[in-house]
Image: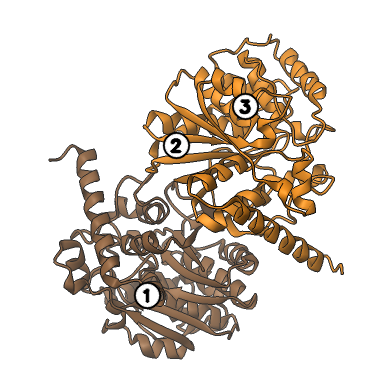
Chain colours: A brown, B orange
Amino acid sequence: MRFLLAIGTTETAQIDGLSAAGADPEAMRWTPAADAELLAYGEPVAAPTVPVSPTGCPTPSLVTRAVRDHLGFDLVTLDAGVDATTAAPTVTVGDRPGADIRQPEPVTNAPTIWERAREFGASLPDEHLLIAESIPGGTTTALGVLTALGEDVGVSSSLPDNPIERKRQVVEAGLAVSGLEPGALAGEPIDAVRLLGDPVLGALGGVVGGALRAGRAVTLAGGTQLLAVAALVRHAGIDDPLSIATTSYVGSDDAVDFGAAAERFDLDCTVTDPGFDRADHVAAERFVHGEAKEGVGMGGALALATWRDLDMAAVRSRFLDRYDRLIDREQALAGEP
Amino acid sequence: MRFLLAIGTTETAQIDGLSAAGADPEAMRWTPAADAELLAYGEPVAAPTVPVSPTGCPTPSLVTRAVRDHLGFDLVTLDAGVDATTAAPTVTVGDRPGADIRQPEPVTNAPTIWERAREFGASLPDEHLLIAESIPGGTTTALGVLTALGEDVGVSSSLPDNPIERKRQVVEAGLAVSGLEPGALAGEPIDAVRLLGDPVLGALGGVVGGALRAGRAVTLAGGTQLLAVAALVRHAGIDDPLSIATTSYVGSDDAVDFGAAAERFDLDCTVTDPGFDRADHVAAERFVHGEAKEGVGMGGALALATWRDLDMAAVRSRFLDRYDRLIDREQALAGEP
């Protein structure tokens, strides 16, 4: 098994009120780089800080890293286009961030990203791949792609109150600037990424398509952004078996009927509860209150823990331990008591 | 523990008769990329073939990978400048291959490579780093750097008959074109890399210096190229404790008094015998006959096996198994019986 994380940034994420993947817009720019470093090294290396939401919810990459601490799985980070440097080792498939989807062509290099990622996915020898993302504002671009493909499945949010109306307005503006109706790009996944998507969706559509065609087992590790990846792959005409594994926070999110969406794209579906309600700790509470919900493969990592008989209490304990150590480290670096 | 492999290529390696790190000059260009892929994935992914010498000796990266199969250690590949694409995840510290050291300035970007690598080495959280290289023609550029620094320790070879006179001629031509006497760059390690070295020596000098200054334990995993790295670090004025771990093939090589050289640079020294004389197999025999000898961290990986009580017979068995499977795969891809 190998875990593939695609990272990217977009100007779409800088639109006010769309994402909680960072304390502020400047910090959000660093979130994917920091997530990749947390998975690779256990702490930020070139990135300045551990990503937290404006209310202090830590990045879900700490949960995925906690599972990796126990199971030691292999990891590859795909750089799809990041507006920051990262010290994580990467395979580069895209060379620039995505623009705002209200621009005419936010991902001009979508065909190149898709093709490079497809070749990479087709060439990997691993029997089973887990596929994850880190890209702020990613549920908005996922909504853009799903809408362009004509798939009405709804999207989740890293915020407890999903700004879904704001996302719809952004997507409508994006469709309008391209002169498109919803569903106009059905069967045209690369164009859907190019006109309404983000670099990470292009990379993951390509890599999953390539891996499936090469006969690999693929588990999409995430929430509605990975549903959009499934939609891209199905609209590319690839009907091989495909699985998705998400968290109970997305599974129970009223904004999206996850089971129905999984059925729509013919996905075998796993939903895993990390049991954070049993942890008396502020970091776990933020998740219980509906923040973050998913990201950086959290749902897939939790499913992997279950498949390999790793006790969820051990995952929670490791997550909280990592969180406390990183907060102590950041306070020490900042000279705070 | 984390294993760091720096990869690079140079035009120096294209000089006739210097290196056995590839079946021919065109194949040699791909060797570092393929070595990184073998360590990361277990087989070549973007690279066309498994690196072998002109007589069929497989790359020592298969030995390092065999140890990794058993121990599962973390790996980062540093791209110091490679004339090929690689599908291995990399941290980029240099953007172009080295030129021929008989040119006036073969590694113009040596200061940038060194500084980026130093920052990276200083930022890693790992307590212990193993440091390895893959760069064809690397013993010639190592001889160049050692000579420029005024260190007369001799160098080994991937060929059974070391073309040491040829290497000396190349280094003398390199010194002459820069108007330098041997020892002229004592205490100037970055200039020694810039004028007589290769991108990998610059990357490893930087990363080791950064890691030592940050208080990490560092083991140089390799032969005379890693002795040159030790020389660079000592000439940078860094006198922290430092170890080197190499194979018995380098340890018993008459071309270099390894023990004396290790003492010269104040290195704690480990020499490990993979016991290939006990394996009745063509791939092991090439090593016993003095080919390859070292590379891609082989000596460090063997030392790690010993430190972790991994039986050397298990390493040999895994190495031969990987070799046979890769040869079968390549014959199948080539349509041979």
Q: Residue B108 carries which label?
A: 3
What percent of the width, then of the height, locates residue B331? 81, 64
Q: Give the spatial CA distance, label 2 vs label 3.
A: 21 Å
Name the spot of residue B206 as percent of width and height, x first. Answer: 50, 30
Asked whether the viewer can see residue B59, the reply is no
> Are marks 2 and 3 in one subunit?
yes
Q: Which amino acid does label 2 sit on?
A: Gly
The foreground one among A46 and A26 is A46
Select label 3 or label 1 by which is in front: 1
According to the picture, the residue beneath numbered tag 2 turns out to be B121
Look at the numbered disc 3 and give the secondary structure of its residue.
loop
Q: What element carries label 1?
A: loop
Q: Which of marks 2 and 3 is in front?
A: 2
A289 versus B134 height, above or below:
below
Q: Between label 2 and label 1, give the one nearer the viewer.
A: 1
Residue displayed at 26% across by 66% down: A316
Question: Mark 3 or mark 2, which is nearer the start of the sequence?
Answer: 3
| Left or right for A135, reference A274 | right
| Three-letter code, disc 1 | Asp
Instruction: Specify the amino acid type for callout 3.
Output: Thr
Q: Is residue A86 above or below residue A188?
A: above
Outermost residue toward the front in this view: B278
Q: x, y percentage for residue B295?
A: 65, 40
**Which of the image's four quarters has the C terminus of chain B?**
bottom right
Name the one closer to the observer, B142 or A156. Answer: B142
Tag count in the figure?
A: 3
Q: Residue beneath label 1, please?
A: A309
Q: What element carries label 2?
A: helix
